[in-house]
Image (cartoon, rainbow, N blue to C red):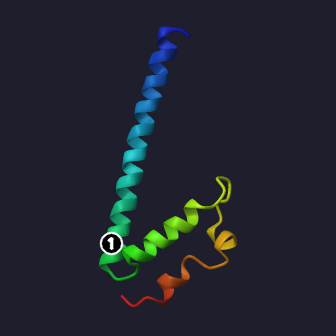
Amino acid sequence: MSLSDTINIYAQIADLKEIDYRNTLTIVALLELLEEKGFISRNQLAERMGVLDQLPALAVDPVSATGANPHSELKNASP
């Protein structure tokens, strides 16, 4: 592997770290706003995280995996 290849890989890793940071920041901000507005509680979030964490790595559809609509709680919540 050449020096330029190595530098390119390190640059790509740095880019991915920045993307990961921005995504994490966005998710945290959204969750805090949803909690502040009364759409979701920390307990509901923790429960859902536990359910999703138990799914196989390739299962990306929480509706079919849990048998429930993950957005139904949001529709029924009062602001």
In the image, 62 versus 43, the foreground residue is 43
Residue 30 in picture, x, y percent from top left: 37, 66
**Looking at the image, which residue sits at the far top?**
2
Measured as percent of width and height from the top left, residue 44 is found at 45, 76
Q: Is residue 1 above or below residue 70?
A: above
Most extreme residue toward the left, as rendered?
36
36 left or right of 57? left
Q: Residue at x 44, y 24 (%)?
A: 10
Which quadrant of the rendered structure holds the N terminus?
top right
Element at badge 1?
Answer: helix
Residue depicted at x 64% and y 53% = 57
Q: Quadrant of residue 16?
A: top left
In the displayed structure, would residue 43 be above or below residue 22? below
Task: Name the quadrant of the C terminus.
Answer: bottom left
Rate crowding at label 1 as few (under 14), some (14 to 19) or many (20 or more) other CA atoms within 10 Å.
few
**Residue at x 50% of width, y 86% of height:** 75
47 or 26: nearer the viewer: 47
Q: Relative to residue 32, is residue 39 depicted above or below?
A: below
Name the amino acid, label 1.
Leu
Asked if residue 24 lies left or right of residue 62, the reply is left
In the picture of the structure, the residue carrying the numbered disc 1 is 33
**Numbered disc total:** 1
The x and y percentages for residue 46 are 44, 69
Q: Image point 41% across, 75% down: which residue?
A: 43
